[in-house]
Image (spheres, rainbow, N blue to C red):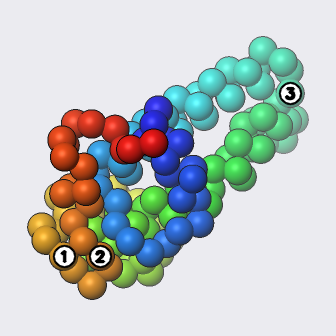
């Protein structure tokens, strides 16, 4: 959960690098919250009539859009790619798959033009970010 909160704190920071763990832990918690918001919409009866998504889900989706894009761009920076590479998701069918494959790759060791290696920022790879 600390990785998720850390990404929310950096919700609009597009510079720097994000390690794989930071990105995927944010994505995991984000997905769990989305599932719970859908369940909550079903239980409360707040689903829309035409779009099958509810008010709670839509509000959360809007609120989490910017942090999701920001952590994705920082993750792409860790791979040495420009944040504009995120626009590949606009290619129908294969764009999202290509982006997911790129985001799953290991980052460039050492420093690149976007900053220092985020894996060396924490003394232990499995520890959460400092508070």
Check disc 3 and report the residue beneath it: 46
Residue positioned 12% across, 67% down in the render: 109
* Mark whose residue sits in front, 2 or 3: 2
Residue positioned 53% across, 68% down in the render: 13
Check disc 2 and report the residue beneath it: 115
**Mark found first going from the N terminus, 2 or 3:** 3
- The residue sitting at the left extreme is 109
Check disc 1 and report the residue beneath it: 111
Q: Is residue 98 visible?
A: no
Relative to 25, residue 14 above or below = below
For disc 3, the neighbor class at 10 Å (few under 14, some 14 to 19, many from 20) is some
Left or right: 112 with respect to 100?
left
Percent across and percent down for residue 105 are: 20, 58
Percent across and percent down for residue 31 are: 51, 36
* Mark whose residue sits in front, 1 or 3: 1
Q: Is residue 64 visible?
A: yes
The image quarter containing residue 35 is top right
Instruction: Tell me the distance, in whole angstroms, between the alpha carbons under discs 1 and 3.
Output: 48 Å
């Amino acid at each position: 959960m600390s990785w998720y909160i850390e990404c929310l704190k950096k919700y609009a920071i597009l510079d720097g690098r994000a390690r794989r763990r930071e990105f995927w832990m944010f994505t995991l918690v984000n997905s769990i919250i989305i599932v719970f918001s859908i369940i909550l919409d079903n239980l409360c009866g707040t689903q829309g009539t035409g779009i099958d998504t509810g008010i709670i889900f839509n509000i959360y989706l809007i609120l989490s859009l910017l942090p999701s894009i920001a952590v994705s761009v920082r993750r792409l920076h860790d791979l040495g790619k420009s944040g504009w590479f995120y626009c590949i998701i606009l290619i129908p069918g294969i764009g999202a798959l290509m982006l997911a494959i790129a985001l799953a790759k290991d980052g460039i060791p050492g420093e690149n033009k976007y900053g220092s290696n985020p894996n060396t920022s924490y003394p232990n790879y499995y520890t959460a970010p400092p508070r």
